[in-house]
Amino acid sequence: MWRAWPVAIDVAVRFGDGDWPDCQSHLLYRERIVPVATPDYISRTKTITCPVDLVDHTLLHALSLDRSWYDWYQWFEHFGVQPGGPLAGPTFDNHLLMMQAALSGRGVALGWIGTASDCLRQGQLTAVLKDPIILDTGLYAVVRNTRDKRIESFLKWITALAAAETEIVNGSFL
C-alpha cells in the first residue's frame, strides 16, 4: 500500500500534470475546456460565432485559488481577445455552483470534461463554440506498484472507461 497521503491506498485518481514523486502516473485524459450554456440561453441571446462574441454575454465565473484552473480572462487571452475591461456576470465561490447557474440558463460557463460531459451528452448544455482548449493537465490514475494483477486489471478498466468518456466528449465538443 502506498502512503503518499495520510491513508494507505493502491490507486489514486488525480488531476494535474502527472508528475508526482514515488509513483507511476497513467494519463486517463487531457482536460478540455469549452464555453457551455443551455440551449434556451443560446436561443434567446445574441448569436455566438467566435470568441469575441462572448464579451457581450453574461459570463459565469468561479473563484479558484488553484492557478491551473482557467478563468475567462485566460480563455480570452488564449484566443487573442482583449475584453477591454471587467467581464460581466456573477462570480461563484466554486465551480459546481457556477455549473448549476449555467444549467439554470443564467449565462455561459467554462465547461471542463469532468463537470460538463454528462450535461453535454444529455443535451442540458451545449458547447457554444466548437474549439476546446486542450490543457497540459489532465486526469491520471496514480499507482505505486503495477505488478499487482488486481491493480493492472483496474488500470485497464479505468483507462478504457476514460477513453470511452473522452470519445463521447470529443464528439460533443467538436
Image (spheres, helix red, strand yellow):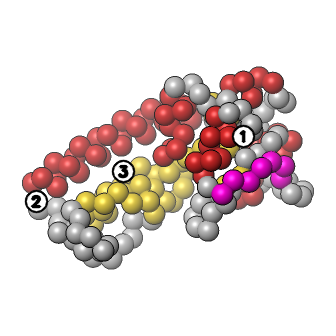
> Disc 1 on helix, strand or loop?
loop
Crowd rating for badge 1 (residues with CA inside 10 Å; few <14, some 14–19, many 20+): many
The residues bearing labels 1 and 3 have C-alpha atoms spaced at a distance of 27 Å
For residue 47, which quarter of the picture?
Answer: top right
Q: Residue furthest bottom?
A: 21
The answer to whether one can see residue 22 in this image is yes
Most frequent secondary structure within the magenta stretch: loop
Residue 85 percent location from the top left of the image: 89, 58
Toward which corner of the image does residue 23 lie, by quadrant?
A: bottom left
Q: Which residue is mark 1?
A: 108
Mark 3 highlights which residue? Answer: 28
Residue 33 rendering spot, x and y as whole percentages: 59, 47
Crowding at mark 2 (Cα within 10 Å: few <14, some 14-19, many 20+): few
Disc nearest the viewer among 2 and 1 = 1
* Disc on res. 93: none
8 inside magenta stretch: no
Magenta stretch: give its range.
87-93
User: What residue is shown at x 40% (from left), y 37% (from top)?
Assistant: 165
Q: Element under label 3?
A: strand
Instruction: Tell me which amino acid carries mark 2.
Output: Asp
